[in-house]
Image: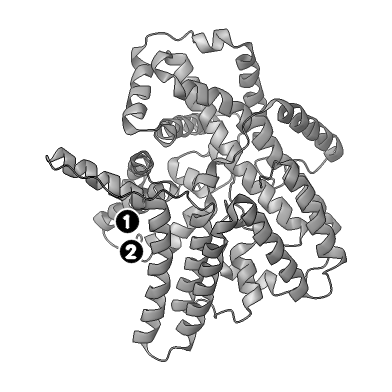
Amino acid sequence: MFFNSLAFAVFLPIVFFLYWFVFNKTKSTQNALLIVASYYFYSCWDWRFLFLLVFSTFLDYFTGIQIEKSNSDRSRKFWFWLSILVNLGFLGIFKYYNFFATSFAEMFSSLGFKVSPMLLNVILPVGISFYTFHGLSYVIDIYYKRIKAEYNFIDYSLFVSYFPLLVAGPIERATHLLPELKEKREFNFEKAKEGVYQIVWGLVKKVVIADTCAVYANAIFDHYQSMNSLSLILGAVYFAFQIYGDFSGYSDIALGVSKLFGLDLLRNFNYPYFSRDIAEFWRRWHISLSSWFRDYLYIPLGGSKGGLMMKIRNTFIIFIVSGFWHGANWTYIVWGFINAVYFLPLLLSNSNRNNMDSIILKWNLDSVRVLFSILTTFLLTCVAWVFFRARTITDAVLYLKRIFTSGEFNSQYLDNERYNYELLLMIGLFVLVEWNNKTKVEPISGKRSMLKMALAIMAIIAFGTYSDYKEFIYFQF
């Protein structure tokens, strides 16, 4: 069930009505309804994988309690590693088994040995990376005594399966969401209104920006061999806005839907394309994942406390693992490696935390430097996105090579498609709106909010009528 589908437009009001007017007596009835709704929501993708979600929930609920009850370090470690290995085992089998099997087969083939690996003919369970990380963070926090184990199974089940964040995040923490789930929610009109604003803006990002950019980005990447320099540059820029509009749009909708039920989720995007360096970009992009790797991988590896070589090692590890988390393809690993290389000069110069303040322009020489830094960071990000989008590393390298070797900057794709001009204007307008709202959480709120809402809804209807692209990019992860 897509957020941008008619089915969800019917599903959400029904759940909203039942939640506030039928099952609103206690916190338990509210949570029970949301669990049922979440399981139905997930089963709409493929009901056969519900057992994975249920099994993962039981596993982490049970092992979390056992870790807390254990009287010896040996017992605590046993239950801790049981949860870690089983969770990562399921993730590895469904998401990475075929990748490793084919990679090893290709390696042996290059050495002259013919290998025919047995591959699994299964689809990737939607959202498995996200709900697995929910459970892992919960168990890890209990093991290191940051939180107490949750004994209420309904509350914990909802923490793992809550439908707005179930299939594409944000990756929640038990320290943040569980306390909210343990309190009865009372209807708050202002919060609900904020939620509606955020849902509409998320749909604008998805339907108007991402889906429109997807049409052109797909056409250019799929036929890059025949495209010239300007077309290829535009293709990379279109994909940059496609993936941002798609994923941040999903996050906005998830946060907005959750506000309708009186719950606040973690913010996942903070205008990342206005970042002044790569370090700032990763503090603003997919915040819940970046902070997850920081807290549960980078810091346990030693973080920045060791010597320079340890810092460099840990930086490359988290970026490469982050790339691998996104998909079982060497392109994602290279994408992570490229971002680590981008980060390296900042680390060596100890300037990776220089841009922690808000962006303020006063139209002087410093403002010119800021704008140049923002543009440079965006261009570097677009280069990395080429590897993220390409089917193979070879395709990505040839794509970038053709930008500098085709010798033509009057794109035939731009000339042949009049709407392409309008798309560029639309992206420019979107950037201006984002810039104007970079300090806000709900861009549609404020003065003339009803007019903004009306214009946004009209844009969604107009573009949604002609858009063929529906799926959210991060569903594949």
Q: Point out the tag, 1 or 2, that comes first from the N-terminus.
A: 2
Please provide percent x and percent y for residue 403.
38, 18
Furthest-left residue in view? 112
In which image quadrant can residue 430 be found? top right
> Which is more toward the observer, 252 or 355?
252
In which image quadrant can residue 164 be found? bottom right
Q: Are marks 1 and 2 in contact (CB under 8 Å)?
A: yes
Please provide percent x and percent y for residue 17.
85, 59
Amino acid carrying label 2: it is Leu
Whole-Å distance between the Cαs marked 1 and 2? Answer: 7 Å
Please provide percent x and percent y for residue 234.
50, 21
User: Of the numbered discs in the image, which one, if any, rests on residue 449?
Assistant: none
Does residue 365 appear in this view?
Answer: no
Does residue 307 appear in this view?
Answer: yes
- The residue under the point 71% across, 41% down is 5
Can you say whether 388 is above or below 22 in the image? above
Residue under numbered circle 1? 314
Q: Report the side of 356 relative to 158 (left or right).
A: left
Furthest-bottom residue in view? 71
Can you say whether 329 is above or below 41 in the image? above
Please provide percent x and percent y for residue 477.
49, 48
> Which is more toward the observer, 21 or 442?
21
User: Of the numbered discs in the image, which one, if any, rests on residue 301?
Assistant: 2
Q: Residues within 10 Å of mark 2 (few under 14, many from 20)?
A: some
> Which is more toward the observer, 21 or 422?
21
